[in-house]
Amino acid sequence: MRHDVLLLNNNYEPLNVCSMVRAMSLMLKGKAEVLHRNGHIVRTGSNTLHAPSVLRLRYSVKRPLPQLRLTRHSVLARDNFTCQYCGFSGKDLTIDHVIPRRMGGGHTWENVVACCRRCNLKKADTPLQKTNMKLRRRPSRPKYIPYISLPEYLRAQSREDWMLYLPVYGDFSHIG
């Protein structure tokens, strides 16, 4: 069972996913209110409280619009932890540059895919056209605006109470 909590700004904009300990601290200090509970009980030295699933801050936090960072974990999440050459699904994946960097391929969303180690060794530093390998789907930058990290957003899709507060992106409707 996961004990993380979706933390919302005062205007209901998602801020981040925090631990139960941090959530309880915000609640006990009166800095956040509970919008949804997860059905569990948390016992402190003097209190018994319902564990939160979604919290909203009582004050507003100003922050710039976040940018989606190109990281290994974000690429793996975008590709649903599936090798884009053979379809192997799992956690033991790496990333591959479709057009090798030494041949001018950039480290961009459109040139990086999730890849199993076997396919990465097979393709090596070779352009895709010179191998018998084919991409399962063309890589592209997600249209996702990162209120929370991309992997957390994808996991959150299974949490009905969280989805009430997260924007919906068509790119990820097939994941879950």
Image: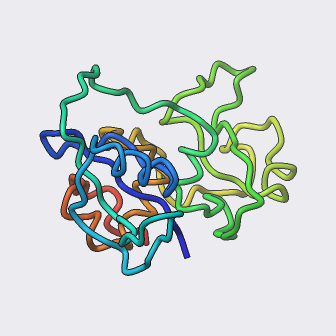
Position of 73 with respect to 26 (left or right) is: right
Position of 147 with respect to 21 (left or right) is: left
Residue 133 horizontal/vertical position (percent): 69, 57
Which color mode does the image show?
rainbow
Q: In which quadrant of the rendered image does the C terminus lie?
A: bottom left
Q: Nearer the viewer, residue 42 or 155?
A: 42
Q: Nearer the viewer, residue 117 or 12?
A: 12
Residue 145 horizontal/vertical position (percent): 30, 38
Tell me which corner region of the image, top left, top right, bottom left or bottom right, holds residue 39: bottom left
Up-down relation of residue 60 to residue 141 (above or below): above
Please, which residue is most extreme toward the left here? 11
Q: Nearer the viewer, residue 90 or 146?
A: 146
Q: Nearer the viewer, residue 46 or 43?
A: 46
Please, which residue is most extreme toward the front here? 46
Q: Residue at x 19, y 63 (%)?
A: 164
Residue 28 horizontal/vertical position (percent): 36, 50
Q: Residue at x 70, y 24 (%)?
A: 101
Q: In which quadrant of the rendered image does the N terminus lie?
A: bottom right
Residue 20 horizontal/vertical position (percent): 49, 57
Q: Residue at x 34, y 27 (%)?
A: 66
